[in-house]
Structures are given as structure tokens and as C-alpha cells.
Amino acid sequence: MGKLKNNSSFLKWFKLVVLILGGGTIYKLSSLKDAFYVPMQEFMHLSHTQIGMAMSVYGMVQTFGNIGSIYIADRFSKKKLIPISLIGVGATGFYLATFPNYSGVLVCWALFSLFGEVLYWPVLLKSVRLLGNEDEQGRMFGFLEAGRGVIDTIVAFSALAIFAVFGKGAGALRSSIIFYSVVPIVIGVISYFMLEDDVIKTTDEKGNKVSRNKVALQGVIKAIKTPEIWVVSLTIFSIYSVYCGLTYFIPFLKDIYAMPVTLVGAYGIINQYGLKMVGGPVGGFLVDKKVKSATKYLRGALLVAAIAMTGFMFLPHESMNIYAGMSLTLGFGAIIFTMRAVFFAPIEEIKVPREISGAAMSIACVLGYSPSMFAYALYGSMLDKTPGLQGYKHVFMTMIGFALLGFVIASILLRIIKNKNKQLKDKTAMNA
């Protein structure tokens, strides 16, 4: 019996590793700005606003496409969707390596979003949720985020090394993009052979045999009619709006602190990927072992983030040491990444039925990630309209506003969870 349990545990973590490999490679191209923001401006001739608009197109496809993935995630198996998504992103990357015109760049980011966000991400989240029981959600999602951070960092530093070896020019950027394209294609092939087909339910609640399409549609309707899912989604919306602002720490340190170009790429990788390795396990541990509630943790962390950013905004940045600026911005980023690691975990707290996990995760993605439609363009336009420190202060104030909004929404969610648990307890007592 113990051997069977050990085998089951091994398979669970092995599947998580395979999922982490995909999750850590599929977004390298769509997040090209994280390590190559300045080279993109120089060699692809893109302004702050244009890079922001590419991310906004990505967000639009993500938001409206996730409406379709509410149905897709529970209708098709991960064994098909995950490899198709990874290979599709890689193929699009080869086109981006030709340095297309601005319209072509927008098409690339639209396709990155279709494959990475619409077809891939909700299926990944569903798969991770179903791997763990109620007491493991924080750790499962925490390890997903941490593992992605490890893979992210290895792949991103490898691309940065390729960029340096090839002379840090246009050809070097092209070589890095090609590298980013090959990796997900390889992982996509591996995933096809390592992941099993999903068992898709083909009976309704009365036990009658129904088609997969009907089962999926019934799940969609049930998920849409669950108000708690929408409140969780709004909490994610607020956190993700703050997260989008982390990108602008890169030009902030370059413009205000005169960060050397050699540090820009390395900082961008640590800021966006390295922090996942810290935030993932820390967030998962705090939720499962200390706070015992993802929602409670998110509420507290949002308040801490708002206070921290308020203090940061009033520091004398123009006279501070570059390493102090780097440390403070990375510290703030770590707070956000502990929340990013677990902000889907409240789906378990609101007792969403497991057979509609895909639909629930897709709804959370639709609303939760919708800031990518406007936040990057909003922050980018603030910097283009008001150059210098004042423009960055406008960005920071907006991030504070979103953090406070999230605090209020998480407080409402906690009240909903408390009332729901009380109702379940009363119902159980009546049936006893």
C-alpha cells in the first residue's frame, strides 16, 4: 500500500515537472521586453508606446480569447492542447526573428497570446489544480511559479549569453529570438509523449450519457452562474494590474539611476523570472502552513504592497545609489510574486466543483488578466507624455491605487468564503 502511495506521489510531481517545463518556456517570446527592452527599441525601432501597444494587443486576444477557452479547457485534452500551444508559439517566434514591420510585430503578439494564453494557460492551471488536494493548493501553485522561475531564468540568461556572444547588435537579438523559438518547440514534443489524455466526463448529473460538447457547455453555464468565481477574478485583476507595473522598473533604473546597459538585461531577468523562484515557494508556504488561507494572505500582502510603494515613491531617487534602487525594486517585486504564485488558489477555497475547473480557471483568466489589455499601454503612455521622474511617479501612484482596490475586493471575498463555510457547516449539522 505504501509503495502504491509513493508511486502515486512520484507521478504527481513528475507530471508537475513536465507542466513546469512548458510554463517556463512558452512565454519567453511574448515577454521579450523583460530581458531585451532596450535592444527592441534600438534594433526593432519600437517606442515605449509601441511596445505597450503590442502588449495591449496581446491582452485583448487573451481576454476575448479566454471567453472561448471557458469551453475549450474542459472539452479537449491537455495531451493535445499543450503541445499545439508550445509548437505554435515557437513557429511564430521564427517569423518575429525576421524583424517584421510594426503591424507584423502586433500580429506576432496576437499569436503569442492565442497559443500561450487562450489555448495553454487555463489548461495548465486546471491540470495543476487537479494534481493536488485541498491542502496542497498553495504548494502546487507555489512550486509551479517557482519552477517556472528556475526555467525562466536559465532560458533567459542563455538567450542573454547568446546576445553577448553574437556582439549585442541586431543579429545578436535575432539569434536570441531564434533560441527562444526552438526551446518551446522541443518542450512541446516532449509534452506530447509525457502527458496522458484527460478523462472527460460523458454523463450528466442524473447519470445519462451525453456528448462531450454538452458536458462542456453545462460546465460553462454552471461556472458563469457562480458569483464567487467572479470575485476571485477581480482580486486577480487588481494584483495583475500592479504586476504589469514591474516592467517599468527597468527603464526607471536606466533613466533615473543611470543603470549601465550591461546590468539592464540581467536586472530584467531577475525582476521578472528570478523573483518567481523566491515568491513561488514563499507564497505557497505562507498560504498552506502559516496563514491557512490564500485569500487572507492576498489581502494582507496587497496592503503591504500599497504601503511599500507609497514609501518608495517619496524616496530621493535622483541622489540614491544604483544598488539601493535595484534592491528596493526587487524587494517590492518579491511581494507581488508571492501573490502571483497563489492568486488562483482561492478557487479551491470557494469550493468550485472539480469537473468545472477548466471553466472556472478560464473565467478567472478572462477578467484577472484583462489589465494586460490596457495597463502596459497606460503606463507606457504616462512615461512618454511626462518624461523623467514625475512620469514614473504617475505609474507608481496608479499601482498603489490598484493595490488598495485589491485589498477591498479580497476583504469582500473573505466575507463570502466565511458565509459559505458557515452555510456548509449548518447543512452538515442538519444532515447529521
Image (cartoon, helix red, strand yellow):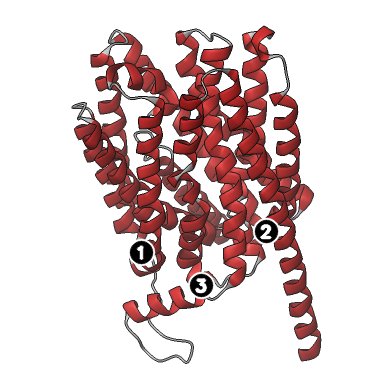
| 428 horizontally vs 189: left or right | right
Whole-angstrom CA distance, mark 2 to mark 3, is 22 Å
Q: Which residue is mark 2?
A: 135
- Residues under numbered marks 1 and 2 in contact, where contact means CB atoms less than 8 Å apart: no
Label number found at residue 411 = none
Residue 346 occupies which quadrant of the picture? bottom right
Q: Please state the horizontal and vertical placement of residue 358, each as a whole percent of the image.
A: 45, 64
- How crowded pointer 2 is (Cα within 10 Å; few <14, some 14-19, many 20+) is rated as few
Which residue is depicted at the point 39% across and 70% down?
199
Whole-angstrom CA distance, mark 1 to mark 2, is 30 Å
- Residues under numbered marks 3 and 1 in contact, where contact means CB atoms less than 8 Å apart: no
Which is more foreground, mark 2 or mark 3?
A: 3
Q: Secondary structure at mark 2?
A: helix
Q: Which residue is mark 3?
A: 223
Q: Secondary structure at mark 1?
A: helix
Q: Please state the horizontal and vertical placement of residue 93, each as a whole percent of the image.
A: 25, 34
Q: Is residue 1 visible?
A: no
Which residue is depicted at the point 38% across and 58% down?
64
| 173 horizontally vs 376: left or right | left
In the rendered image, which quarter contains the C terminus?
A: bottom right
In the rendered image, which quarter contains the N terminus?
A: bottom right
Earlier in the chain: of badge 2 and badge 3, it is 2
- How crowded pointer 1 is (Cα within 10 Å; few <14, some 14-19, many 20+) is rated as some
Q: Is residue 263 visible?
A: yes
Q: Secondary structure at mark 3?
A: helix
**Label 3 amino acid?**
Ala
Residue 130 vertical position relative to residue 138 in the rendered view, above or below: below
**Label 2 amino acid?**
Asp
Which is more foreground, mark 1 or mark 2?
A: 1
Q: Which residue is mark 1?
A: 68
